[in-house]
Amino acid sequence: MGGVSVGVLDHFNIRTRNLAETVRFYADVLGLEKGARPNFAFPGAWMYSEGKPVVHLVDISATAEPQKPDSGVVHHVAFVSRGFDGMKQRLASKGMKFEARQVPGGDLWQIFVHDPNGVMIELNYEAASEQGAAPVEKADDIGRQ
């Protein structure tokens, strides 16, 4: 397969009947910025992280399209992140329920939080680059029913 690569995740898209609340979550809770978006014929918003539009939101409130009750077959969406302790404090200050854990082996710390549409967001932190106490190591599958 020489030279062939899928590359890295560019963005994910959420079709929501709760655009304002969803924009607030990604901006106020996760710290993304609402930014430029092409002049599409439908309403929505693009949320940026480090200058890249990583979350695309489409407002379906004016349509008959039903809001999916959760993220469907997509279990979660993950970001490579920095500032583990700071994000835990940020989430706690916003009253958000979240789970912090360490992947077995200790190289990766994670935070899991849900957006207003039921989408699970996974934030991954390289343990060697982080300060503070390590979270509890867990080998179970997050979100498994």
Image (cartoon, grey):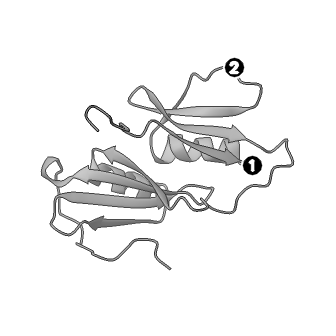
Q: Which residue does the image show at 85% across and 43% down from the upper left? A: 63
Q: Is residue 138 left or right of residue 119?
A: left
User: Residue placed at 57% from the left, 62% from the top?
Assistant: 73
Quadrant for residue 19, please give it: top right
> Sequence order check: which comes first, mark 1 or mark 2?
1
Which is nearer the eye, 95 or 15?
15
From the image, which quarter does the N terminus lie in?
top left
Q: Residue furthest bottom?
A: 145
Judge from the rendering whether residue 117 lies leftward or rightward of residue 97; answer left or right. right
Q: Position of residue 71 (x, y in %)?
A: 59, 59
Q: Name the residue under label 1.
A: 17
Q: What residue type is labelled 2?
A: Asn
Numbered mark located on residue 39 in the image: 2
Residue 87: percent from the left, percent from the top? 35, 51
Q: Quick one: label 1, few (<14), some, or many (20+) residues within 10 Å?
A: some
Please determine whether, in this image, residue 43 is positioned above or below residue 39: below
Position of 106 compared to 19: left or right?
Answer: left
Q: What residue type is labelled 1?
A: Arg
